[in-house]
């Protein structure tokens, strides 16, 4: 059995009440994932989807996995989910995370984006290894868009800003043992925001490839997204009116049920538009089947990080039609929309089946950079290197 050569607690004095360092065999590694959600109990977003996928696959490979997340309606304080022990804390009592982090007694605390949880984990267990994957860093303009287009209300946006960008969180980030991003294009933004001197390595989002892709015989485009204001789903619905010969399918729901009802009343009678609601990819193949038959994935959001839906669409050979263009994914593997002219972009992709070549190239891009097994092995290599090093990384 291979044992870590150095204790995780090599960062100096941990304080009199700190938990003692663990000397963990790699085969019995214990990892705690810290996130604002885990794609269950009514909260379904990209962060949670990535956290659940990562935790599930680590658990399948013998890692003991915990996740500390806000407790949602219907969620017990302790739950078992896909091999992950999920510890939930009351939404408006974040300090209770301190006890949960101690109960995890993990070797590595891995934040799925910086948050107050990152700060608390580092303060509570400074002797352990702490790393973060930046998924959607927001600058002033990003927060302005969020405030102007709230998913629920503007107070929630302010609370989210405090939870992610409080000065204590920013300071904690610069003390972590490892800083990673989901894509290289985020590096410049992260350097400015957190005053970092070095370029970050990547820990991509894991994506499962669809091996048997059979496209619909009729032009089919889909939108896989929350139907919230920032996502601007009405642009997708209006596009359906302009292309009656194309089948439009929207998969998703809104956190604001009144807003969602208004959308349904306004667009529910468009004959070539189907609103199929939320499709849980962890419970059935319905989402994968939708992407497999779709020609094009449309994203109308005002702002995004690198959306998981982009990667999942490409993993099913869908071309991308999008207003946002993170890592030039839309321009390379579809069409980058200027001035919200989605109609022109759709015409370009449909003409002479241009979407097909774009989707096939995107599939190869995901296969080479985001394929599930490849990404999980990279995470495990990072964890093992951290547990085997004697001095925490400097940033």
Image: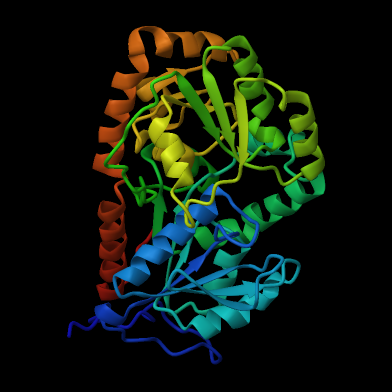
Q: Is residue 177 visible?
A: no
Q: Find residue 82 and report its horizontal and vertical position in percent.
A: 45, 68
Q: Between 62 and 3, which is closer to the camera in this rendering? A: 62
User: In the figure, is residue 320 to the left or right of 37?
Assistant: left
Instruction: Determine whether 276 is above or below 127 in the image.
Output: above
Quadrant of the snapshot with the C terminus: bottom left
Place of residue 181 in the rendered image (x, y in percent of width and height, measured from the top left): 41, 48
In the rendered view of the protein, which quadrant contains the N terminus? Answer: bottom left
Above or below, 15 relative to 328: below
The answer to which quarter of the image holds residue 334 is top left
The residue at the point 52 percent across, 8 percent down is 344
Which colour assignment does the render follow? Answer: rainbow
67 lies left or right of 242? left
Name which quarter of the figure residue 385 lies in. Answer: bottom left
**Would you say 368 lies left or right of 283 here?**
left
Q: Nearer the viewer, residue 30 or 248?
A: 248
- Which sits in the foreground, 356 or 92? 356
Residue shown at 39% from the left, 41% from the top: 183
Q: Position of residue 87 (x, y in %)?
A: 58, 75
Kindly give the residue lying farthest to the left in the view shown: 1
Count of numbered circles on the image: 0
Q: Is residue 62 visible?
A: yes
Q: Residue at x 61, y 24 (%)?
A: 273
Residue at the image position 70 percent from the left and 42 percent from the top: 254
- Residue 131 drawn at (x, y percent): 43, 63
Q: Camera-side residue: 194 or 380?
A: 380
């Amino acid at each position: 059995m291979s044992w870590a050569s150095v204790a995780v607690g090599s960062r100096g004095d941990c304080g009199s009440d700190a938990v003692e360092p663990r000397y963990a065999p790699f085969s019995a590694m214990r990892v705690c994932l810290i996130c604002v959600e885990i794609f269950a109990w009514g909260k379904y977003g990209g962060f949670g989807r990535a956290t659940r996928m990562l935790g599930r696959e680590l658990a399948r490979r013998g890692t003991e996995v915990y996740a500390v997340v806000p407790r949602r309606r219907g969620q017990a304080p302790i739950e078992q989910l896909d091999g992950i022990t999920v510890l939930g804390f009351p939404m408006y009592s974040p300090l209770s995370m301190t006890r949960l982090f101690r109960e995890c007694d993990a070797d590595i605390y891995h934040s799925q984006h910086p948050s107050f949880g990152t700060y608390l984990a580092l303060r509570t267990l400074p002797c352990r290894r702490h790393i973060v994957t930046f998924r959607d860093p927001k600058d002033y303009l990003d927060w302005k868009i969020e405030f102007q287009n709230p998913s629920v209300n503007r107070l929630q946006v302010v609370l989210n800003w405090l939870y992610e960008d409080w000065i204590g969180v920013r300071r904690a980030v610069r003390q972590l043992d490892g800083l990673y991003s989901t894509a290289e294009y985020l590096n410049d933004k992260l350097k400015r925001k957190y005053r970092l001197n070095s370029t970050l390595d990547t820990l991509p989002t894991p994506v499962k490839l669809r091996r048997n892709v059979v496209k619909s015989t009729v032009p089919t485009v889909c939108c896989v997204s929350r139907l919230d204001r920032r996502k601007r789903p009405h642009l997708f619905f209006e596009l359906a009116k302009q292309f009656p010969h194309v089948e439009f399918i929207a998969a998703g729901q809104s956190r604001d049920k009144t807003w969602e009802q208004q959308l349904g009343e306004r667009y529910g009678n468009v004959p070539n538009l189907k609103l199929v609601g939320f499709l849980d990819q962890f419970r059935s193949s319905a989402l994968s089947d939708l992407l497999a038959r779709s020609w094009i994935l449309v994203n109308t959001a005002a702002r995004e990080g690198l959306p998981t839906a982009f990667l999942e669409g490409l993993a099913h050979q869908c071309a991308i039609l999008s207003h946002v263009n993170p890592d030039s994914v839309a321009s390379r593997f579809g069409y980058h929309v200027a001035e919200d002219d989605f109609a022109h972009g759709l015409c370009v992709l449909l003409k002479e089946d241009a979407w097909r070549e774009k989707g096939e190239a995107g599939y190869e891009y995901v296969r080479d950079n985001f394929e599930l097994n490849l990404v999980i092995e990279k995470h495990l290599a990072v964890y093992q290197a951290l547990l085997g090093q004697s001095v925490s990384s400097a940033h």
